[in-house]
Amino acid sequence: MVVAEQFDSLDALSDPVRQHTRARVVLGPAPTALLETVLGVRPHTSPAEHVPPGRGYARLGSGPAHRLQVPATPDPYDDATSDAHRQAVLELLPPRTTPADGEKLPVPAEAVAAESS
């Protein structure tokens, strides 16, 4: 399995790695030529430069490229995230807590029992 988060890393993959990578996924907007380089075929669906967040393409083995949609979840702590998206994600998360300086969190009883076994 190979994971390249940015297209800049594409050149770092050797030919044997590219030839033996059977599952390929591209999420987000990308030029058609770049998609064809990553997937090995040109997608036959919507224009790749105009995809909504979470949309992309997947190809398994030598099969066709399929359009893919995954939940788009922006990082709520990233300054580039809009207030509306930040609030929507934060509402789904449990409250953020941090122990006070020097305070240690209690160890669950199950963990103590597992250590002594």
Image (cartoon, rainbow, N blue to C red):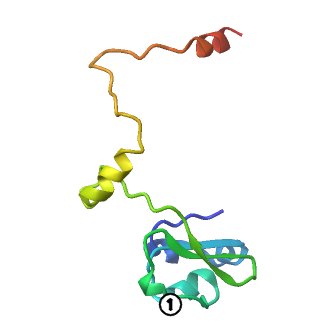
Q: Position of residue 23 (x, y in %)?
A: 68, 70
For the N terminus, the image quarter is bottom right
The C terminus - image quarter: top right
Q: Residues within 10 Å of mark 1 (few under 14, many from 20)?
A: some
* Figure check: 19 above or below 88: below
- Relative placement, left or right, of 56 versus 99 is right
Decide: is 2 above or below 19: above
Q: Is residue 22 above or below residue 34?
A: above
Q: Position of residue 83 (x, y in %)?
A: 24, 56
Circle 1 sits in a helix, a strand or a loop, which is it? Answer: helix
User: Which residue occupies 41% across, 17% down?
Assistant: 105
Q: Position of residue 101 (x, y in %)?
A: 26, 19
Q: Is residue 60 left or right of residue 55?
A: right
User: Which three-letter amino acid code belongs to the residue tagged 1?
Assistant: Thr
Residue at (75, 82) in percent of width and height: 62
Residues 57 and 33: in front is: 57
The total number of labels drawn is 1
Q: Is residue 62 left or right of residue 5?
A: right
Q: Position of residue 93 (x, y in %)?
A: 41, 41
Label 1 sits on residue: 32
Residue 22's quadrant in the figure? Answer: bottom right
Question: Residue shown at 45%/62% (left/top)?
Answer: 72
